[in-house]
Image (cartoon, grey):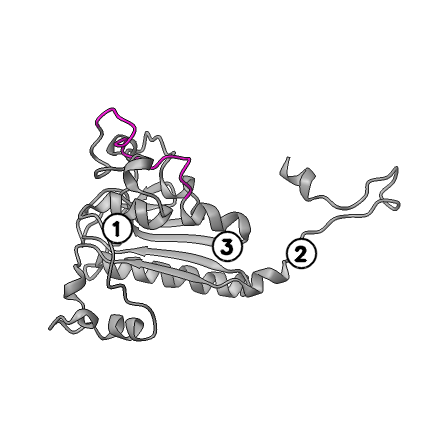
């Protein structure tokens, strides 16, 4: 059991003779970077200012100026396979997502979900002390598994994320979306000015404020995926 492996104290005949074991924050956590991954849906690279577009994208251009821009890359034109590759680093055909999650063909390469043998970033970071947060579009669970009856096996909280706000399908209404919070369906805000993109960002920012307030030294992985 996990608790047995982590216990490094000593148990003797009485409490006074025994030595307790307390979990302490590792100094390594302070050296681990926070990671923010942002996914834009239905955006081609030629639509960004930093790649020569006439469309003004100053925030993205600023990030590109201080970071890396790829000149040679491959991406699928489909939602679920792209997200699979991005989160797992694996070829989408080899882990069950050759097409969008709504499509299955009875073969291992098209199952509507990502194989458990292919861990995603959240599943790899969480055991190392990271808080893992996902806000926005998921689209990595079979349509047969997105009802309140489940199964929930491939929902975000069962695939490495501590918190999730967003929607499971490939698309939803931007003003009256089908929202999920954690593992529960919730009603969209009654505010007539609500928009899904703002809700995705506001929720992510709220989570980060809560985390910094409660555990400022805890590293985080934030996955923000906007809707189509």
Q: Quadrant of the N terminus?
A: top right
Q: Provide residue 106's location: percent of width, then percent of height.
A: 24, 24
* Residue labelled with disc 1: 188
Which mark sits nearer the N-terminus, 2 or 3?
2
Residue at the location (41% across, 43% down)? Answer: 157
Q: Which residues are magenta?
A: 105-119
Query: Which residue is rendered at x = 23% and y = 56% of the image?
Result: 196
State the residue lying farthest toward the front. Answer: 72
Image height of 126 relative to 49, above or below: above
Task: Label 1, secondary structure: give it.
Answer: loop
Our reading of the magenta stretch's main secondary structure is loop
- The answer to whether any part of residue 66 appears in the image is yes
Q: Secondary structure at mark 3?
A: loop
Residue 130 tag number: 3
Q: Nearer the viewer, mark 3 or mark 1?
A: 3
What's the distance in space between the residues labelled 1 and 2, CA to CA?
A: 40 Å
* Residue ID for mark 2: 24
């Amino acid at each position: 059991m996990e608790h047995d492996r982590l216990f490094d104290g000593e148990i003797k005949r009485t409490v006074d003779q025994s030595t307790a074991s307390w979990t302490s924050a590792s100094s390594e956590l302070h050296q681990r970077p926070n990671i923010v991954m942002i996914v834009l849906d239905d955006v081609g690279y030629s639509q960004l200012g930093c790649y020569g577009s006439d469309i003004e994208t100053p925030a993205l251009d600023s990030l590109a100026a201080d970071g890396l821009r790829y000149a040679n890359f491959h991406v699928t034109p489909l939602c679920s396979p792209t997200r699979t590759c991005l989160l797992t680093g694996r070829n989408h055909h080899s882990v069950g997502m050759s097409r969008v999650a709504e499509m299955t063909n009875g073969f291992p390469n098209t199952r509507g979900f990502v194989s458990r043998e292919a861990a995603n970033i959240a599943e790899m970071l969480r055991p190392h002390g990271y808080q893992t947060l996902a806000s926005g579009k998921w689209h990595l669970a079979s349509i047969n598994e997105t009802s309140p009856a489940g199964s929930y096996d491939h929902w975000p909280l069962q695939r490495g994320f501590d918190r999730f706000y967003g929607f499971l399908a490939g698309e939803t209404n931007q003003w009256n979306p089908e929202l999920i919070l954690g593992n529960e369906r919730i009603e969209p805000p009654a505010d007539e000015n609500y928009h899904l993109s703002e809700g995705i960002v506001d929720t992510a920012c709220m989570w980060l404020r809560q985390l910094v307030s409660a555990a400022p030294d805890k590293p985080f992985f934030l996955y923000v995926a906007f809707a189509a």
